[in-house]
């Protein structure tokens, strides 16, 4: 076993409260494309830039175009959790992991069995009426065409944080509290460039381990840096 992976295992074994903070790299190994890599969504060609499509303004002004892109690119139901998702769920069940904080919107952590998950950017599996706030499932968005409408006539919006929208206060407070109370924070599959989520690392008071294929601006703060894919690392834990 790699020396650094042995060190990560030791850090986990010595910790009473572990928190995992994950980005797109957690789900790319399930086949879900990320946003910013060479082959990511932001580097593909559309009638409008994806960053513009995934904005609150575009959603409100060009709603039908928004849902064409959304249904084509963000339906995570066809993908399955991978070894990292399952290992994290096992760690929580064993009482070792206290929370997962994720930037992903695919719901794969919950499908793998994780219970305490702070979804900073929401989830494609939840939707609500902007008028009466009635809840709708993923099939009510992905299983229909056109603009989804509530029985009251209101527009149904995916419970995802679009550009120009703030993060949910309750979710942020829970994530920050979990990170601040952890004696080990493992950050994986993220370049830590998306603000404000990347700033939450500053609340870490315990040990810090970074697992990412490439280096990040926070490597100098970490007690352990492993530049490998998450699957390669977590399959050995």
Image (cartoon, rainbow, N blue to C red):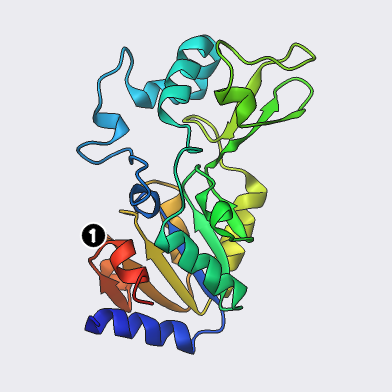
Q: From the image, tell me which residue sits under label 1.
A: 213
The quarter in which the N terminus is drawn is bottom left
Residue at image coords 54%, 32%: 165
The quarter in which the C terminus is drawn is bottom left
Seen from the viewer's position, the closer of residues 108 and 24 is 108
In this rendering, the answer to whether 105 lies above or below 154 is below
Residue 15's x, y, as percent? 50, 84
In this rendering, the answer to whether 169 lies above or below 179 is above
101 displayed left or right of 116:
left
Residue at image coords 53%, 35%: 161
Count how many numbered circles sit on residues in the image: 1
Seen from the viewer's position, the closer of residues 202 and 30 is 30
84 displayed left or right of 151:
left
Q: Secondary structure at mark 1?
A: loop
Residue 61's x, y, as percent? 52, 10
In this rendering, the answer to whether 173 lies above or below 56 is below
Q: Is residue 180 visible?
A: no
Q: Is residue 184 visible?
A: yes
Residue at image coords 52%, 23%: 56
231 displayed left or right of 77:
left
Quarter occupied by residue 180: bottom right
Residue 76's x, y, as percent? 47, 38
Residue 153's x, y, as percent? 75, 11
Instruction: Determine crowd level at label 1: few under 14, some 14-19, many 20+ residues with C-alpha closer than 10 A.
Output: some
Residue at image coords 48%, 63%: 86
């Amino acid at each position: 076993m790699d020396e650094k992976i042995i060190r990560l295992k030791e850090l986990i074994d010595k910790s009473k409260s572990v928190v995992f903070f994950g980005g797109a790299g957690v789900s790319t190994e399930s086949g879900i494309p990320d946003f910013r890599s060479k082959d990511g969504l932001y580097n593909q060609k559309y009638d409008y830039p994806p960053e513009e499509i995934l904005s609150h303004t575009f959603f409100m002004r060009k709603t039908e175009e928004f849902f064409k892109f959304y249904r084509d690119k963000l339906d995570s139901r066809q993908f399955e959790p991978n070894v990292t998702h399952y290992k994290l769920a096992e760690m929580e069940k064993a009482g070792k992991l206290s929370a997962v904080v994720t930037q992903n919107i695919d719901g794969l952590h919950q499908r793998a069995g994780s219970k305490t998950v702070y979804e900073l950017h929401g989830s494609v599996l939840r939707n609500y009426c902007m008028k009466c706030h009635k809840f709708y499932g993923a099939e009510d968005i992905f299983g229909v065409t056109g603009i989804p409408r509530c029985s009251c006539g209101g527009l149904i919006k995916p419970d995802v944080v679009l550009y120009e929208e703030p993060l949910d206060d309750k979710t942020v407070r829970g994530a920050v509290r979990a990170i601040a109370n952890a004696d080990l924070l493992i950050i994986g599959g993220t370049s830590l460039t998306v603000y404000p989520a990347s700033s939450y690392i500053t609340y870490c008071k315990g040990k810090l381990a970074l697992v990412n294929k490439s280096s990040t601006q926070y490597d100098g703060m970490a007690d352990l840096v492993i530049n490998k894919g998450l699957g390669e690392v977590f399959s050995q834990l």
